[in-house]
Image (spheres, grey):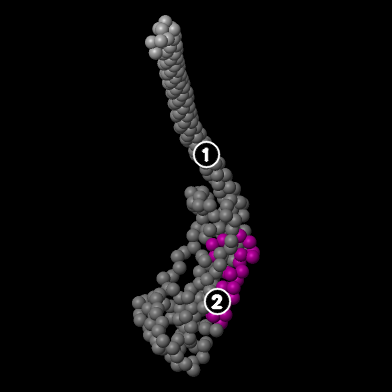
Amino acid sequence: MILPFAETSLPPSMTTPLRFIVAFILAAIPVLPAAAAGMGIVIHKDQPFTEDVFAVATEYRDYSRFDAVSNFVTTDNTKLALTQSQLVRVIPYPSPQTVANILREADLAPLNAAVAELADLIKKYPRSAKFLNPRLRLFQGEIARLRAGQVKFEGAWLPTRKAYDDLLAARKVAVEAQLSAEKRQAEALRMEEEKQRMQAASGLAAAEAAQMEQARLAQEAKRKMSEEERKAEELRKIEEEKRLAVARLAAQRQEEERLQRELRIAEEQREVALLRYTAGRLKKADQFRRGLSEPVFAK
């Protein structure tokens, strides 16, 4: 079975989706005829011992394989059932369109391999030639077009290498224009985001300033309240000291008045005692005088 062909890798700048440029350049380039409706051919034998050169080739458009039998639908809608002993080989049609880019001789490697394999199949199964020769000529035609100076790019043939270079140049200009536009758009977006960020920062700064001012006012109010409380406390202490001083003065006055009362009482008692003493002395003196004035004999 012929394996699918790998595409030649290209730089990313060559695969930019600028289809309008490609359509403009390739508008006049002819396209290969569409492939036949068949998907491939099946090689089969009536008898297992039949030689390969006599094997039959039938074109099919669909088939399904099972363990015991394989069912094919031919291109004329005939159903063909083959046992495993009758079935020799299923050959899907290869297509040169699987190689999308043919820019240099090295890109022909999968096409050359397909040509060699098709030639081997035709040689081994001669009755497949009527189906495989057109496919072989397709691949040979692709090879001949590159060697004639044409270039295949993204599945379409360009008439000359210059057309390919012009296409890449046009794509480069378009890509640069697109990048420039994207850069301007990104710069505009960045400036808008910067503007919004600055506005947000300004709003945040204003909010922070307002919050700081509120905190300052609250602190100032607290300080004033503390100052007023301190002054009130000082006034209270002064009033308390005044009250205590008045109380001490009142107590002192009371003490002085008590002492004065005691002094007056003591003075009065002293005077009373003195008077009593004086009275006693006077009484004794009077008695003495009386005693002296009376006759002795009277006793």
Of 241 and 103, nearer the camera is 241
Q: Is mark 1 on a helix, strand or loop?
A: helix
Mark 2: give few (<14), some (14-19) or many (20+) Cα within 10 Å. Answer: many
Mark 1: give few (<14), some (14-19) or many (20+) Cα within 10 Å. Answer: few
Disc number for residue 82: none
Identify the residue at horizontal 58%, vertical 63% (top origin): 8
Q: Can residue 68 be seen in this view?
A: yes
Of 198 and 261, nearer the camera is 261
Q: Is residue 284 depicted above or below 206 in this figure?
A: above
Q: Residue 83, image x and y in percent?
A: 41, 88
Of 47 and 208, nearer the camera is 208
Identify the residue at horizontal 39%, vertical 76% (top origin): 62
* Residue 140 placement: quadrant: bottom right
Magenta-colored stretch includes residue 110: yes
Q: Name the residue under label 2.
A: 118
User: In this picture, which residue range is highlighted in magenta?
Assistant: 99-123
Mark-to-mark CA distance, 1 and 2: 59 Å
Q: Is residue 30 depicted above or below 80 in this figure?
A: above
Taking the view exactly as shown, the residue that stands out farthest to the top is 293
Of 109 and 273, nearer the camera is 273
Q: Name the residue under label 1.
A: 190
Magenta-colored stretch includes residue 171: no
Q: Which amino acid does label 2 sit on?
A: Leu
Identify the residue at horizontal 41%, vertical 7% (top origin): 295
Identify the residue at horizontal 42%, vertical 73% (top origin): 38
